[in-house]
Every structure is written in structure tokens, then in C-alpha cells.
Amino acid sequence: MIFKSVFGFSMLQYHKEKNILLALQLIQNSNVQIKNIATLTGYTSSSKFTASFKKRFGVLPTEARDQ
């Protein structure tokens, strides 16, 4: 509760944001397969990773790689 009152978001939200930003960096700067990036960043399902990524960035992970 203290974390949220100080930073404005929960520790879980912070952790998820940190991981999705890491995923973006890996997608744009490496050749690691997207399904492996999903696993590395804590997702147990590629489809959940893809949905979270699109919700956060507005593009699919494959589209982010092409940019």
C-alpha cells in the first residue's frame, strides 16, 4: 500500500511495465524469437503477451520488430 501511495501504481503494475518495456527493447534490438521474449518477460502464453503488448504500445510485437 505504501508503494502505491508514493509512486501512484502498485508494485505489480510497476513489475509488468518494467517487463513490457524490456520486451519492447528486446524486440527492437535483438533477433530473439518473440515467443522466447514472452517467456523471458514472465508470460506463460504468447497470446497473453501479444494482447498485453498491443494494449500497451498499440501495435503487435511483430509490427514493432519491423519498425
Image (tube, rainbow, N blue to C red):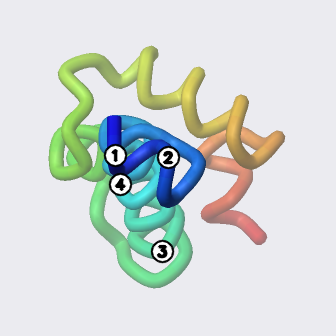
Q: Residue at x 48, y 74 (%)?
A: 25
| Residue designated by label 2 | 5
Q: Earlier in the sequence, mark 3 or mark 4?
A: 4
Give the distance between the C-alpha atoms of the residues marked 3 and 1, in whole angstroms: 30 Å
Q: Amino acid at mark 3?
A: Gln
Q: CA distance from mark 2 to mark 1?
A: 5 Å
> Which residue is tagged 1?
2
> Which amino acid type is shown beneath numbered disc 1?
Ile
What is the CA distance from the residue labelled 4 to the residue labelled 2? Answer: 22 Å
Where, quadrant-wise, is the C terminus in this rendering? bottom right
* Quarter of the rendering containing residue 10: top left
63 relative to 58, above or below: below
Residue 13 circle label: none
Residue 23 spot, x, y in % from top left: 41, 59
Can you give x and y, in whole percent of width and height, for residue 5 in the image? 50, 46
Q: Indicate left or right for 32 with 23 as reference.
A: left
The residue where tag 3 is placed is 25
